[in-house]
Amino acid sequence: MTEIIAGLHLSPPECLALLGAVALVVARWLPPAARPRVTVAAGAVLVLSAGVLAAVGFRWQMLPVLAAVALVSPFAVSPLLRRRSGRPAWRARWWLALPGSVACLGLIAVGPSAAWAFPVPGFPEPTGRFAVGTHVAQWTDPRRPETFTADPHDRRTVVVQLWYPARKSPPGAERAQYLGRTEHEARTVSDALARQVGLPGFLVDGVPRARTHAVFDAPVAGGGGRFPVVLFSPGSGGVRTQNTAWAEELAAHGYVVAALDHPYDSAAVVLTDGRTIRSRTASTGDRDKDEELAADWTAVRAADLGFVRTQLDRLDGGEITGPLAGRLDTARTAVTGHSMGGAAALLAARHDRRFDAVIDLDGYPHGPASPSLHQPTLALTQALTPATDPRYLPRLTEALERNSATSYRLTVPGAAHLTFMDGPLYLPPVPSIVGSLGRTRSPRVVAATTLAFLDATLRPGPGDPAAALSAYGDLSVHPPGDSR
């Protein structure tokens, strides 16, 4: 009943409220015999839809519609009451009523326009042959102190969400909540993300309402096969679920994606004991100081990735409980990340040869450029503009050219920094913010390019990844370079 209708960005009760509001305004201009019936019918529809919305929760996008109803109702109901009492019906002259009707219709139009600009995200249907399951785990590294707190006994804890190939769930199986295991967690994370970028939380209140295509703890796909693993680190302040559409597409094609929350860096991390850890990372405005801080935070993230890589070995071996015991092919593991997460992926791969491939989604390489990389690497970037940090391309090119394995840099036309995450699904389609690829095409392009690279590096076979990648943008290939 409250499922959002694709294309309209409204639920059925919201559509009914919208139609009822329009009918209430238009009734004034119908033939006299039709006005009472249309007014009564419109009122009944509005009462019914308002009752449903009151039960499931109003979205702020409906407030302009309700305001229009409040303005027009006295003028719509008054003639009916006067007629019922036997008094002559009174109506405002047309030249007075016309501006009011136009203004009310304008208010009503704001509702669907706002729902289009800030929708409940609709996730693209994965194109692979597998259904998708998801599982959340919380792991503590007993060997690593938590550097963000003063407690000497505090140890580094990360929350990891796994997306994996699953058996097809029965009809009606509840799909996983976006942004969290529960609606409360989803709203906590959504509010924190909004505050971090300076948006009022209500603007994106549709985001925690969204459902993905995965099913929590669904049975792993049959056949007994083992699946390559892809670790993911989100952007600065980002959360483990920020690339859900991408993760589901990879899982549907036979990969296990393990995405991390980085406590005290991610906007909000909800632990299993109910505590919420907020971000403590913030820039100072001093360019050199901020670069030093970013390098430190990147190093913490890289250590998190290495720790999770170890935990996945233990999960596969049955030392840790979970649905994927015996099904992970950790001998084929890629490390990936968006923005600062991309920098963390590069740094983790430099120091940990257990990672067999690297993907950097528009991430500036913070920290030292040595040691060199030794794994096939793909860097996806947005088009460079005069506003781009002039240090970005030289630093990235240096890392790719010094790699002892082949590296690829693909510049995706029409992409912006947020194209490489779920942002295009729920933010206003402003090219400078989310790029110009469109809500559906953005996640598909990012997934298709990373799949082409992963299939070539973790599932080597005939074919050249450069041929597949070049179809999506401007590709630069860096052959094996100086590995000093």
Image (spheres, rainbow, N blue to C red):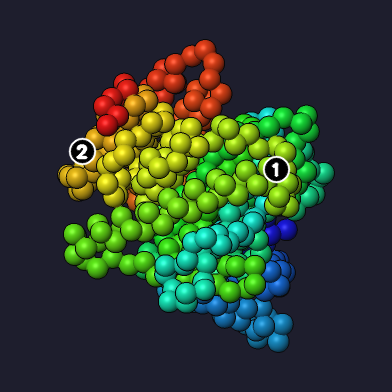
Is 130 left, or right, of 436 in this rendering?
Answer: right
The answer to whether residue 321 is seen in the rendering is: yes
User: Marks 2 and 1: CB-CB under 8 Å?
Assistant: no
Q: Which residue is mark 1?
A: 317
Above/below status of 21 relative to 231: below
**Mark 2 or 1: the one toward you:** 1
Whole-percent x, y for residue 298 in the image: 37, 54
Q: Is residue 435 left or right of residue 229?
A: left
Q: Residues within 10 Å of mark 2 (few under 14, many from 20)?
A: few
Q: Secondary structure at mark 2?
A: helix
Compute the Cα span from label 2 to label 1: 42 Å
Q: Answer with the quarter of the image where residue 295 lies.
A: bottom left
**Residue at the image position 48 percent from the left and 40 percent from the top:** 335
Q: Which residue is mark 2?
A: 394
Identify the mark nearer the N-term, 2 or 1: 1
Judged from the image, the secondary structure of the residue bearing numbered disc 1 is: loop
Question: Please, which residue is most extreme toward the right here?
Answer: 170
Q: Quadrant where the C terminus lies?
A: top left
Relative height, residue 162 to residue 477 (above, below): below
Q: Quadrant of residue 402?
A: top left
The kind of residue tagged 1 is: Gly
